[in-house]
Amino acid sequence: MHNRTLIALACAAFSGFAQSPAPQTPDTAVEVASQETSVTFQSKVNLVLVPVVVRDRNGKPVGTLKREDFQLFDKGKLQTIAKFSVETSSGRAIPLTTAVERSAEEKLAQPDAPGIIPPEHFVAYLFDDVHLAFADLVQSRDATEKHLAELKNTDRAAIYTTSGQTMLDFTDDRDKLHQTLAALRMHPIARSAVQECPDISYYMADLIQNKHDASALRAAEQETVICLNLQTLKDAEPIVNSAAQRTLSAGSHETRVALGTLRDLVRRMAAMPGQRVIVLISPGFLRLTDDFSEETEIIDRAIKNNVTISALDARGLYTDMPDIAKRTISGDADRVKQQLDRESSRAEADIMAELAAGTGGTFYENSNDLAQGLRQLSAAPEVYYVIGFSPQNLKLDGSYHTLKVSVNPPAGLSVKARRGYYAPRHLSDADDNAKEEISQALFSREEMHDIPVEMHTQFFKSSETDARLVVMTRLDVRKLHFRKTDGRNDNEVVIVSGLFDRNGNFLQGSSKKILMKLKDDTLLNKLNSGMTIRSDFKVAPGTYVIRLVVRDAEGQMMAAQNGAVEIP
């Protein structure tokens, strides 16, 4: 089950809280209650986010620019930048508490303890074993093996394949990484392993079936006459059309499998608490117009979840010279097929370039130094910007919008940003957007302090292998914004706690909604010490990172804190 799914389930089923009370009059209503219900907040539903990497003449990222230094154009029209942030790698240590069983007076006390620097750089290597040729797979696998030996202590690597046949989740275990790389194999799904007659590529099949290209059809017919010893081109036409249709169906299936795997991996990466990079290792594959919206959806999802997609052309340094072993014809038809093969190679690389450009990544191609390429691609930019805007008078028609980002002054600076987006066909539900906002905060390492919150931990061991970890959140409700209703101060607060292992993998989550209808004297006098909310986790001994996120409905403010605990 995906981590994001676990969080959604946690948000729907709160632990340790009483059921909602029966309806009461305003004067007798319970002042503080809990409710097992979905979280609901108001939020913007049409914000378009654009990650931007700016480099100087030497290729180094520039992190000193401000909002006013950027201009963003949607279909050539200048937009107002509504969101602006500078994202960097923190490298900060999280205070580590070696929890011990304590008396009641000591439960909220936290002694000073040395901190730990948790994993904050997550790289998923996605091998396109559906499209990779054997030689390219071996070459890229060996380069990855060499590159993984250079991982730092704060790095975690995962290995995935587009076929889904081989997978290793995030780890720093070099032996497991080595074993998984050694298990990689080619897994074409629908294509034949032998050369057929006629030999029609996916690109050529698209020209014949969808674009009705006469020259492509004639070249295939001439090849069919020769390889099947037919009498006329007319005899070859139904054979060519049948072969083209089969190839088109097979190629489309393989492309959608690859895109589907990438989409799921982006969703998986969203649950990693730090810098998130996907390195797609592929010879490229053809994406037809029908699949363009899915590609854009992947880019949008990656941007919203701070996932960078980079791509390595596993063909290395290649040329457009024809494959002599596959030549079965000569003359004009042969020249046409050679030209189509060159066009196909370039078109297959386009999707890797588009995915990289759209998410702030890099496309590394036309080089045999694949290890160097992996070194460049796996390193997330030290600093980048996220700018967002709300399109004015946006038509919900699914149309494509081109984007352009520029920097003033531009002298000596290069800008890399996504190149466009599709308009939605309907606005997102505000509740879903709010849940997504909380989830993004949970799977981050950035701290926020809009709401005064303190986090404390303790544990109780029932055996050598079992323990109960308690996370206590102390909230100063007097600092919140309240809405006056029937003489009460109303607000709702959602408190989400997440538990992560040493590799950054999400383990457990707890989400609780606090419904407050406070009288004035309660708000002013009776809550001087704040409100304490408790979340319990059943765990085994080990080191854990805790992420706490608090969000209120009225002020729409957030707090986020990191903690770490070691249970001996």
Image (cartoon, grey):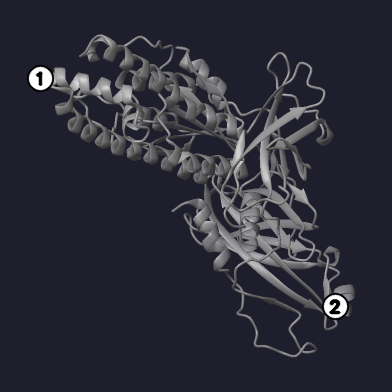
- Residues at marks 1 and 2, CA–CA distance in whole angstroms: 94 Å
Image quadrant of residue 387?
A: top right
Tell me which residue sits at (71%, 47%) in the image.
391
Mark 1 or mark 2, earlier in chain: 1
- Can residue 565 be seen here? The reply is yes
Against 544, residue 146 (above or below) is above
Q: Are marks 1 and 2 in contact (CB under 8 Å)?
A: no
**Quarter residue 495 falls in:** bottom right
Q: Nearer the viewer, residue 100 or 473?
A: 473
How many neighbours does mark 1 have within 10 angstroms: few (below 14), some (14-19), or many (20 or more)?
few
Q: In the rendered image, which residue does mark 1 sit on?
A: 229
**439 lies above or below 50:** below
**Residue 434 is drawn in which quadrant?**
bottom right
Q: Secondary structure at mark 1?
A: loop
Q: Position of residue 146 (x, y in %)?
A: 45, 18
How far across and down, in percent of the image, does residue 295 sit?
A: 49, 39
- Would residue 178 appear left or right of 410 to someone viewing this image? left
- Of discs 1 and 2, which sits in the foreground? 1
Q: Residue at x 85, y 78 (%)?
A: 522
- Dot label at residue 2: none
Camera-nearest residue between 192 and 332: 332
Q: Nearer the viewer, residue 50 or 536?
A: 50
Residue nearest the observer in this picture, 111 or 163? 163
The answer to whether residue 503 is seen in the rendering is no
Which mark, by number, is residue 522? Answer: 2
Q: Amino acid at mark 2?
A: Thr
The spot of residue 285 in percent (x, y) is 40, 29
Query: What's the residue type where badge 1 is placed?
Result: Asn
Q: Residue at x 60, y 41 (%)?
A: 421
Q: Position of residue 195 (x, y in %)?
A: 20, 23
Q: Secondary structure at mark 2?
A: helix
